[in-house]
Amino acid sequence: MPQPHGAAARSHRRSRAEGAPWRRLLYLCFFASGAAGLALEIVWSKYLSYLLGNSIYGVSTVVAAFLGGLGLGAVVGGKLSSRTAAPLRLYARLELIVGTLGLLSPLAYQAAGPLFASLYGAMGGSGAPFLLVRFAILFAALLIPTIAMGATLPLVVSAFVRHHGEFGSSVSRLYGINTAGAVAGVIAAGFVLIPAIGLWKTAAAAALIDFAVAAAILGSYPREMGARAKAAPGDAPGGAATAVPLPSPAHRLSRLIVPLFAVSGFAAILYEVAWTRILSVPFGGMVYSFSAILAVYLLGIALGAGIAARLLRALRSPAALFGLFQLLLAGSIVLGSRVFDSLPHIQTTLIAQSRGSAFRLFAGEAGVTALIVLLPTLLLGALFPLAAAIHKSGRSGRHGAGSAVGTIYASNTLGSIAGSLLTGFVLIPTIGSLRAILAAAAANAAIGCLALLLGEGTARRRSAAAAVATAAAVAVALFATPAWQAERMSLGFVRLLRSYEFGGEGLTHRMIEKVGTSTELERLLFYREGRVATVTVLETGGRRALLINGKTDATTGTGEDMAQQVMVGQMPLLLVPDAKDVCIVGYGSGVTTHAVLTHPVKSALTIELEGAVIEAAPFFSEAASRPLSDPRSRLVVEDAGTYLRSTKGTFDVIISEPSNPWIAGVGNLFTKEFYAEARRRLRQGGIFCQWIQTYSVSPATLSTVFRTVVTAFPHGQLFYVESSGDLIILASPDREVTLDQARMREVLSEPAIGEDFARIGIHSLEDVLGAYRGRLDRVAREAGPGPVNTDDNSWLEHQAPLDLIAPQEENPLLLRSAQVEADLGQSIR
């Protein structure tokens, strides 16, 4: 932009110097509100995961409702900014609203639970009518806080432009500062606050920050600013300045920028979703890994906005730079995609070098994420202020800075909503993450070409030639990008963390060498990127394994996982042989459901989160005999917590066999609140069966599981599957769980049941009792005081990954001690 000279320059510098303290305060406040806003979004997302579950429907509902409110808020904020004389005071009041609703969010969560449960039952589960009604309710609930959040950027930009006078660089700087605050919010909430003080107190801390921001703005914003404000052309309320006429091509771009930036928003959210899905496999899907990925993504956007602030000061027209950055974005996406096939080797190296340090591992994962994500997100961050500047340049004087920012923000958000829904529901399940990413890169390249073609004069012709050449290079790179090797991408490398526990450093280095050189590690039988997870079936030496997001969840053969799967299905029915209705959480290979169906039950309901797991089931038909084809069997593809909270059905036996609790979201099925729901669905005299792994789990963490289970089921027995390192808890809310030898022998004598036990080496009641490890109440009592895993603290979800990374000592609770023998003597009848 033109620089002031002479007296005008001195006046300009004096004005800037006088306003410097105010600008610094505004920067600090906008940084803080970005941090508080992101922390609240994380808290609300976690609360909503309890209400809606971790299914694709629940996650997509949350994302769409959040983005919809933010986009609507941007439009509202843009309109208000051109009608108010004090946009900062309005911004402060919005911060008060957000903070107040943040404080009230735990109460809203408690009130919403019964409402969603009754709707689920009344409308027949997760059909289209229920999903639409649920979205409408959730959107209405989030409407006020998200509108308030979305309106802040247009209002602050409007105020800043009035006093500072520079639109493009002001948008860039403020957008970058707010996003940098969001990075701080992710790190603080994801790594520190929620693990340390829980959801409610984290929301309260964020609310206090919002209140402090409001107080600072209302208390320090100088009243005389309004009188001496230098309104930017068309930015003050009722301003009558007129826009400088633009050349026809540039004017066309200013009109097209809104739909073009919506497409760009579609691509941006697609990248975020697909990158997270891809990286969650080698990273293990831990909650800390997701926080690291999000922090790096936002950091790139913040840095990009900062770079755009400098560039926009020197540019007369941002159109050429917008087109160039779209093309560079497409190229950087293609470049980053070539790293995917190396991720297993990179992650294995990180595991070896972390040497049991969670900080080293997560820092290394953040570095790997940056290698793929940082350059593209930097360009994405620069595109927003460039698009806002293009849009502002073509508007008449009555449309101010805030309105331009709000419109561009809303268009980008609208594209993001469409992208979040289509990516999870359609694109990843049909064409896969890699192809979806490359298709989005092609869209960015097309936008870049169009922007350059609509440039100005001679520069436009040069830009058009450059666009064609760059687009051709991107197209060649797109087609030349190799597909990854699914066998390598599906290996659960987080399990290599156990190598220090069992095999020492040498095993880890041998595995690094194997991953780096092998091209046929296993025979790939099945690979599907589902709506929630990536599911793979691999075969090695006749032994098949089911992997979900790279983590082995079921195997065939005579030991290890097979023993655990059979025992989990058989043991509760040994104790309740007259059970009629059974509920099984988690299908896996189907072996547990098959074990249940060897008994004369009336119905066996299996709840599975990922539909692709069911598609993989035929590969385990020899081990499980197609249990879903049994007329007594029923399948529900849904989040187990959502289903149990919502169903009116009751059961004689409930078997909870989810994946490992160190995986993000799985800890929801180990909370005090989940056990309370399970208790309500259990008939009198029934048995609740909980599986939990003991490998890579500290004694303190296992004690927390015991303390949590007994809050709903005070009576129970423990059995240990030594071959797989798994513990089975058989518990009851209303009676002592006794071991009736006569009844158990009678059940074991049934041919189908006896054969199922025999394939894992159990041939008698004595073999069954050899797995006994004590009374639940006694073990929980000896664990002593300590934390209980709740919805609020999500203690297990945050502690279990740390246990996995650090080598663990052998748990004394798993030993066959004299106390265990005494418990057995008291329990046998």
Image (cartoon, rainbow, N blue to C red):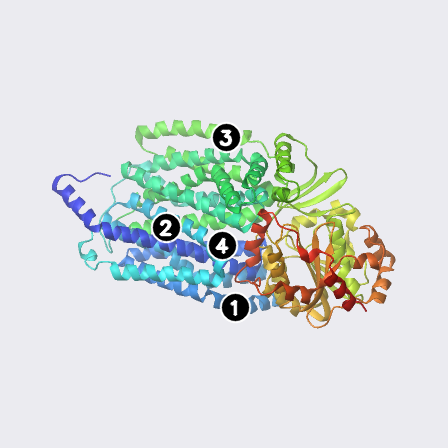
Task: Give the mark, 1 or 2, whose residue is nearer the N terminus.
Answer: 1
C-alpha separation, residue under disc 4 versus residue under disc 1? 22 Å
Task: Give the mark, 4 or 2, whose residue is nearer the N terminus.
Answer: 4
Counting from the top left corner in percent of width and height, residue 26 is at 29, 53
Q: Nearer the viewer, residue 517 or 813?
A: 813
- Amino acid type at mark 2: Asn
C-alpha separation, residue under disc 4 versus residue under disc 2? 21 Å
Quadrant containing the N terminus in the rendered view: top left
- Write down the residue under mark 1: 110
Element on which disc 4 rests: helix
- Write down the residue under mark 2: 178
Task: Give the mark, 4 or 1, whose residue is nearer the N terminus.
Answer: 4
Task: Give the mark, 2 or 3, whose residue is nearer the N terminus.
Answer: 2
Q: Nearer the viewer, residue 103 or 628?
A: 103
| Cβ atoms under marks 4 and 2 closer than 8 Å | no
Task: Give the mark, 1 or 3, whose residue is nearer the N terminus.
Answer: 1
Mark 3 neighbour density, 10 Å: few (under 14) some (14–19) many (20 or more): some
Element on which disc 1 rests: helix
Counting from the top left corner in percent of width and height, residue 666 is at 60, 55
- Write down the residue under mark 3: 475
Q: Nearer the viewer, residue 603 or 577?
A: 577
In the displayed structure, 404 sits above or below 510; it is: below
C-alpha separation, residue under disc 1 versus residue under disc 2? 31 Å
